């Protein structure tokens, strides 16, 4: 049975969103096409009508998830009276962010795997990193300072997740907060 163009587009969007969450949760190689499609409520056969292969989906899902992350950062900045770096750090370095890997930061969840996914995914990460640095850099901050903050926050989140529900996780988050 053929589906309408609108349904096909909705299905594709659902697969991309599902893949973005599952890749962040399990890694690119930690989830197969069959499991991914089942989680999206679709059949495995439908995958190959939508995507050339898993690497094409990885690139598209990564791009969508990183755009979602950027939107979260923009919303956090807009809702705060604090400087952008402080506003983002307050949200980013929170226990709730540690606990939400599937919906959380793609840098912390997938950056270490990006080189193994090829140039397309690396290019998408590069663009997202530049965009994030622009959000952290303001009239009173230089690029190096923004890079230091981004590196510290991502590293702290990764290590807090690795430590698990322990006081050490909180120590990593607290240590990464900008000092006034």
Image (cartoon, rainbow, N blue to C red):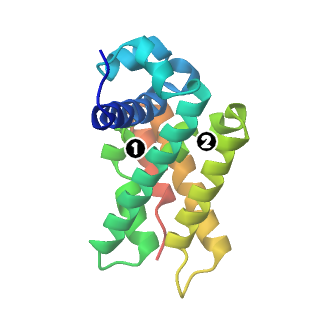
Image quadrant in which you'd find residue 120: top right
Rendered location of residue 121, percent (x, y):
64, 41
In the displayed structure, 68 sits above or below 55; it is: below
Residue 32, position as x, y percentages in the image: 50, 15
Q: Residue at x 61, y 58 (%)?
A: 127
Q: Residue at x 36, y 13 (%)?
A: 43
Mark 2 — residue? 111
Measured along the vertical axis of the image, is residue 3 above or below residue 136? above
Disc 1 secondary structure class: loop
Residue 26's disc is: none
Residue on which the image places disc 1:
104
**Residue 173: percent from the left, percent from the top?**
44, 51
Which of the two residues, 112 or 168, is positioned nearer the viewer here?
A: 112
Q: Nearer the viewer, residue 153 or 105?
A: 105
- Is residue 127 something one can see in this rendering? yes
Residue at 67% of width from left, 33% of height from top? 117
**Disc 1 crowd, CA 10 A, few/some/many (<14, 14-19, 20+):** many
Q: Earlier in the sequence, mark 2 or mark 1?
A: 1
110 vs 175: above or below:
above
Q: Nearer the viewer, residue 35 or 73?
A: 35
Q: Which residue occupies 30% across, 80% down?
A: 81
Residue 129, above or below 170: below
Q: Residue furthest bottom?
A: 139
The residue carrying pointer 2 sits among few (fewer than 14), some (14 to 19) or many (20 or more) residues within 10 Å by Cα, namely some
Q: Position of residue 101 (x, y in %)?
A: 40, 36
Depth check: give the residue in front, 30 or 93: 30
Could you tell me how far apart the alpha carbons at marks 2 and 1 are, in whole angstroms? 13 Å
Which quadrant of the figure contains the N terminus?
top left
Question: Which of the 4 quarters of the picture holds residue 14?
Answer: top left
Is 7 on the left-hand or right-hand side of 129? left
């Amino acid at each position: 049975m053929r589906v309408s163009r609108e349904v096909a587009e909705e299905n594709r969007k659902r697969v991309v969103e599902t893949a973005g969450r599952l890749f962040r949760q399990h890694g690119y190689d930690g989830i197969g096409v069959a499991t991914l499609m089942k989680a999206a409520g679709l059949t495995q056969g439908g995958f190959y009508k939508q995507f050339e292969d898993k690497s094409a989906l990885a690139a598209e899902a990564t791009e969508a998830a990183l755009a979602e992350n950027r939107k979260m950062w923009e919303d956090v900045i807009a809702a705060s009276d604090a400087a952008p770096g402080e506003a983002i750090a307050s949200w980013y370095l929170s226990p709730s962010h540690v606990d939400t890997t599937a919906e959380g930061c793609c840098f912390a969840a997938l950056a270490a795997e990006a080189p193994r996914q090829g140039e397309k995914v690396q290019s998408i990460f590069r663009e997202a990193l530049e965009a994030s640095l622009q959000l952290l850099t303001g009239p009173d901050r230089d690029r190096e300072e923004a890079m230091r903050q981004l590196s510290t926050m991502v590293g702290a989140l990764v290590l807090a997740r690795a430590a698990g529900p322990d006081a050490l996780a909180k120590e990593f988050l607290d240590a990464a907060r900008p000092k006034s």
